[in-house]
Image: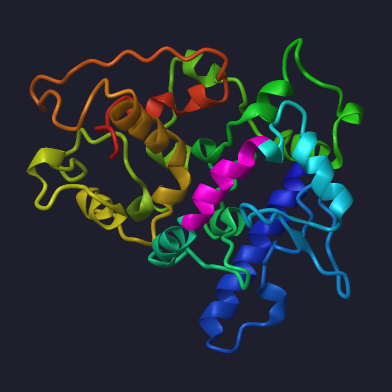
Amino acid sequence: MDGSIYFNRITKGAKDLIKAEQSGKPMPASFDFANSQICAWCKQSIEPPKKPLRCSACKAPIYCSAKCAKRDWKTPAVPNAVTHKVLCTDNKRHMQRLPEVQAVLKSFPWGRLESDGTFSSEIARGRFDVLGGSGYGFWSHRGGPIPHQLHGDGAFQIDNVSHSAQFIQTMLRAFDHLDGSDLLKTRHLTDEEGWKLPRELIPFRDITQDARRPMLMTQFQGGVVDWDSWYRWRNLPKMSPAALLMDFPMSVYQMLVHCLEITHPNAGSEIKPVNLDIYFLGVEVELNFLPLYVYAQSPP
């Protein structure tokens, strides 16, 4: 399937879902986007009367057969990915936090959970037309290994990879920018151009205007401790998909503060900021996000 067709279908499905929600009528079964019946290895649908098999240790992935489960344990389904044997321990830890994550998602108007308890980020993005393809919001592009492998000497041939990887490659070909080259241009995108959201939903990075300038975190009453307080700090309604779209820069910030401990929210001041130089190597796609740090204070 062509990437642009895929984006259009997801967006149409999301908009149809919004209409169904607003109708006040019982939700048709066709709007249940549960994905727990898809084999983690072969990506085939598991149809009744066949029952899915689930990893007994972490309870995360499901399989259509014991054969697929054994394959996933030893061999990655996508080139350069890791096996389930490597992921299983972390999966178990993440699954223990599932109720906490689901509660956070349900606090957002767009955080709809499917019948199997999963959350479709594609459908959520489709509500706002920010799926990351051509014309769908520049800063909603995805990173990860496969975009990098589409370019340069390390690009793998599409006939040598799994069906799921082929689909992802095809989808990503609809993206406008995968290499950070926009940073070399004399003019960078504005917030409206980069996010492609209604103004009231944009997490503006250019806060040189007083109306957009949040107070220092250290002065914010109660502190910025969760998503609710972050949204209040940035004067954004919870309808804004900022939490969905800013997962990459916020993850980087969390790593810098809590893992590497090289800076913290109390460092510097509005008058005398502290410079932080970050050197990335081999993350061409993620370089597209660097303009998000130009004006705005780092997110919590």
What secondary structure do most residues of the magenta stretch adopt? helix
Q: Would you place residue 14 above or below residue 203 in this image?
A: below
In which quadrant is the C terminus drawn?
top left
Compared to residue 136, the image places residue 205 above or below, namely above
Left or right placement of residue 228 versus residue 144 in this view: left
Residue at left offset 46%, top offset 49%: 244
In the image: residue 9, left or right of residue 270: right
The answer to which quarter of the image holds residue 124 is bottom right
Residues shaded magenta? 86-96
Q: Is residue 279 above or below residue 228?
A: above
Q: Residue at x 70, y 31 (%)?
A: 81
Residue 163 rendering spot, x and y as whole percentages: 86, 41
How many discs appear?
A: 0
Q: Is residue 240 visible?
A: yes
In the image shown, does 26 or 91 lie closer to the viewer?
A: 91
- In the image, 151 versus 113, the foreground residue is 113
Q: Residue at x 67, y 73 (%)?
A: 31
